[in-house]
């Protein structure tokens, strides 16, 4: 059982759940205390390994895969083999107080039938079927994990311009996992900053009067409240895949901002949301229109209530404006209203400011302009920005 739980934990980690060594040990102790009845085992492991309900869709299918349910006949047979123990409680046959040791009925997982001395040997057919079931459950995930990890590496390195519809669909599932990791990173950072950073100078100064005994720690004041986030994502055909994946990364992290406003644009501003991994427009959005970021800037400039001194304005686009007026002064005016502007460019640097690209006019107003030509670079940029 210990090996099975270890395989289960490794499989959860491979699918994006962050599980520490201490949590894995807690899971083994919980199983030893609660027993190995299937539903009790499920909830004991979930209590130790699942930190957020959004991880439950990952946890439950993998649990069913590695701890498969026995058929109805097998369940009925186990119920019939249960007898009343000396204290009146239901105790599985062979686990009560006997000559080989007392009081181990509920102390932990039962040993394997073939290695437990003093136990009545089960039928050979039942033992063989259980052993085959265990071996198939333990071996089945290994090829899947290796193949899946290879596919993940391929998706992370694949340039956005080469994405097919199948790649986009698989990348949506991957982004859900990456978004959960980003949310966990932000949660850990927020917990660490709950009291503010340690102020070494004030701590040492306070310790001089007592010779350092006892040493009382002093902390710096906490940072101001959570910032606001406004994201503008270009949904024109050339960069639509990158924008959709960026929105999928930002949605799980929304709880760590005071306010979050997500917008898509082609030739006008449109509020959007993410529903089941897909972009859901909250207004009219013509995906076949000619890109006009200058007009988008005018509309955003009119939304004064959205932009404050704590706002992070995140823009994803290729700055190709179909030779329409770029209206770069509007972006400089927006820079004076917000904390900072960061532009993510899903095109290679060699193509910046070529053709109808006017990125050079917008870049001076930005705190950073980052090249994000594939999903791995996009994830790195989001981690850097947030």
Image (cartoon, rainbow, N blue to C red):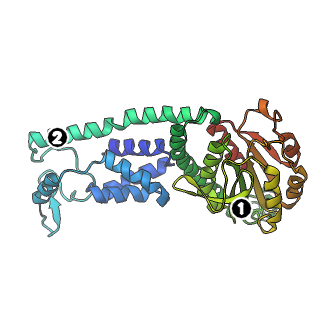
Q: CA distance from mark 1 to mark 2?
A: 63 Å
Task: Give the label, 1 or 2, closer to the camera.
Answer: 2
Q: Quadrant of residue 270?
A: bottom right
Mark 1 Cα-neighbour bin, 10 Å: few <14, some 14–19, many ≥20: few
Above/below status of 254 relative to 240: below
The answer to whether residue 362 is left or right of residue 141 is: right
Residue 159: give x, y in percent of width and height: 63, 33
Q: Quadrant of residue 279?
A: bottom right
* Residue 154 locus on image (x, y percent): 55, 32
Q: Residue at x 52, y 36 (%)?
A: 152
Residue placed most toward the observer, 214 or 373: 373
Q: Is residue 156 visible?
A: yes
Asked whether 207 or 268 is in front, the reply is 268
Residue tagged 1 = 215
Residue at the image point whose x is 71% and y is 55% from the top: 231
Q: Which residue is painted at 64% across and 43% down in the image?
A: 242
Residue 129 numbered tag:
2
Asked if the residue under mark 2 is in contact with the one under mark 1, i.e. CB atoms within 8 Å, the reply is no
- Pick the residue in front: 330 or 3: 330
Q: Residue 185: in sight, yes or no?
A: no
Among the two numbered marks 1 and 2 on one chain, the one whose residue lies closer to the N terminus: 2
Q: Is residue 210 left or right of residue 283?
A: right
User: Is residue 164 shown above or below 274?
Assistant: above
Q: Is residue 316 left or right of residue 130?
A: right
Q: Is residue 251 left or right of residue 9?
A: right
Residue 386 - label: none
Q: Secondary structure at mark 2?
A: helix
Image coordinates of residue 336 in percent, x first then y, are 88, 58
Q: Residues within 10 Å of mark 2 (few under 14, many from 20)?
A: few
């Amino acid at each position: 059982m210990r090996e099975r739980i270890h395989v289960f934990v490794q499989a959860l980690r491979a699918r994006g759940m962050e599980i520490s060594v201490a949590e894995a040990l807690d899971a083994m102790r919980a199983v030893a205390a609660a027993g190995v009845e299937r539903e009790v085992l499920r909830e004991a492991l979930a209590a130790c390994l699942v930190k957020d309900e959004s991880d439950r869709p990952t946890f439950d299918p993998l649990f069913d895969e590695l701890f498969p349910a026995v058929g109805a006949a097998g369940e009925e047979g186990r119920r019939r083999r249960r007898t009343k123990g000396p204290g009146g409680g239901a105790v599985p046959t062979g686990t009560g107080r006997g000559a080989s040791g007392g009081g181990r009925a509920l102390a932990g997982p039962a040993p394997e039938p073939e290695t437990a001395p003093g136990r009545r040997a089960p039928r050979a057919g039942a033992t063989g079927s259980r052993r085959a079931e265990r071996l198939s459950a333990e071996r089945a995930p290994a090829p899947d994990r290796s193949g899946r990890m290879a596919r993940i590496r391929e998706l992370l390195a694949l340039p956005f311009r080469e994405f097919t519809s199948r790649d986009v669909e698989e990348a949506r599932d991957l982004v859900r996992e990456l978004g959960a990791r980003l949310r966990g990173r932000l949660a850990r950072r927020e917990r660490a900053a709950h009291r503010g950073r340690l102020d070494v100078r004030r701590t040492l100064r306070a310790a001089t009067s007592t010779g350092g005994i006892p040493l009382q720690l002093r902390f710096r004041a906490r940072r101001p409240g959570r910032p606001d986030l406004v994201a503008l994502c270009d949904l024109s055909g050339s960069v639509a895949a990158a924008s959709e994946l960026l929105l999928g990364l930002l949605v799980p992290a929304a709880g760590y901002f005071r306010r979050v406003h997500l917008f898509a644009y082609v030739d006008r501003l449109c509020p959007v949301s993410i529903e089941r991994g897909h972009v859901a427009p909250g207004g009219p959005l013509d995906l076949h229109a000619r890109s006009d970021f200058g007009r988008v800037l005018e509309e955003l400039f009119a939304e004064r209530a959205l932009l404050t001194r704590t706002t992070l304005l995140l823009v994803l686009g290729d700055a190709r404006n179909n030779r329409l007026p770029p209206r770069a002064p509007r972006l400089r005016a927006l820079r004076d209203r917000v904390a900072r502007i960061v532009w993510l460019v899903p095109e290679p640097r060699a193509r910046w400011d070529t053709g109808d690209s006017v990125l050079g006019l917008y870049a001076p107003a930005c705190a950073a302009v980052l090249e994000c030509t594939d999903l791995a670079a996009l994830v790195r940029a989001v981690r850097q920005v947030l």
